[in-house]
Structures are given as structure tokens and as C-alpha cells.
Amino acid sequence: MLAAGLAIADEKGLDAVTMGAVAARLGVTPMALYRHVANKADLMDGIVELLLTEFPPPPAGPWTDRLSGLADAIRASARRHPSVFPLLLQRPATTPRARQARHGVYAALEEAGIDTARLAQTERLISTAVLGFAVSEAAGRFRSHSRRQLDDDFARLLELLGRFIESESTRPGTDRPVPARPSSP
């Protein structure tokens, strides 16, 4: 059912995702869907879950590799689902499986030395930056730029986010901001 909703959104946009449209795609009555979801909001939460879980979690390794791997996977997902992906900026991750992605980020941030009291805020800032870039790219905001330029921009964003994380770390020796690179002339 969720896959049918995602397919409709990919083909016709988010506004086309209705209980009736999903039921028609599946060849059932709309009432049959209510055995699985309470309403359209639940259906949308399920689509958020699909977007956040369509890629495997990053393999074990340093926190920097796990976060950059997740960011790359998010960007790739946005390219596959350009008309659907903005949903991640509109709806929070509410299902248990969707929240697993956020908990993976929390674990990496804890490993990086982020204080537990600041985990949620740090995750929100990082996620918003990565999702914002991915949505902007998928929606065509950067269409006048080459793929190489976008890849370079995304790498720079990840570098800046890494510096931000390091500057927020409470670990000895990493509790001061990393100096910024001098800007090019």
C-alpha cells in the first residue's frame, strides 16, 4: 500500500496521493485501506518511512563516514523521488522505522562527542541542511549548475557540517571551533 502511494506521488505529485487513488492502484476499495492506516496522514507518514528506509543504514565505521554515507543516500533518494522528497521537510519521522534513521544520526553524533542535551538540536540542524540541499537539487533549483559543481557544493556542505559537529563536541581537544578555510579570491 505504501509503495503504491509512493508510486502515485512519483508519477503525479503528492496532491494526487489520496485514499481513493491508492485503492484504485491496488484494485481494492478505499475502505480496505483503513485496515492498515487510520487516515491520509498515516499514509503520508508511511511514505516518509519509505523514503527514510529505502537505503540501507551506513556500514559500521567512523561517525564521519556513517553521516556522509547517510547524506549521500538521502541525496540519491531525493533524485529518485523529486516530487515526493519535499515531504521530508513537511512531516516529521513518526513511525518506528522512520525514527531509526534519526537514531542512527544520534548514535554517530554521540560518538563524535555531542552532549546528549544537544543531540536533538544538532540532528535537526544537520538534517535540515542536507534535506534542504537534496530537495533544492531534486526540485531543479540548481539546474543551471553542472553535476560536478553540485557534487563539489555538496562535498563542501558536508565539510562545513563536519566542522560544525567538531566545534560542538565536548571531547577534550575538540571543544573549540575548527578554523574556517580562507575564502578564495
Image: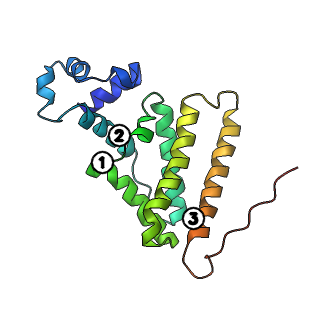
Name the side, left or right, on which 173 lies relative to 116. right
Q: Looking at numbered disc 3 in the image, what kind of residue is underneath it?
A: Ile
Q: Looking at numbered disc 1 in the image, what kind of residue is underneath it?
A: Thr
Q: Earlier in the sequence, mark 1 or mark 3?
A: 1
- Residue 94 disc label: 1
Residue located at (13% from left, 31% from top): 34
In the foreground, 57 or 139? 139
Quote the CA–CA distance across marks 1 and 3.
25 Å
Q: Earlier in the sequence, mark 1 or mark 2?
A: 2
The residue tagged 3 is: 165
Residue 4 position in % (x across, y down) = 28, 27
Q: Is residue 136 above or below residue 30?
A: below
Residue located at (61% from left, 30% from top): 141
Quadrant in the rendering for residue 147: top right
Decide: marks 1, 2 in contact (CB < 8 A)? Answer: yes
Residue 60 seen: no
Instruction: Please tell me how crowded label 1 is: few (under 14), some (14-19), or many (20+) other residues with Cα within 10 Å.
Output: some
Residue 107 seen: yes
Residue 177 position in % (x across, y down) = 67, 70
The residue tagged 2 is: 48
Quote the CA–CA distance across marks 1 and 2.
9 Å
Q: Earlier in the sequence, mark 3 or mark 2?
A: 2
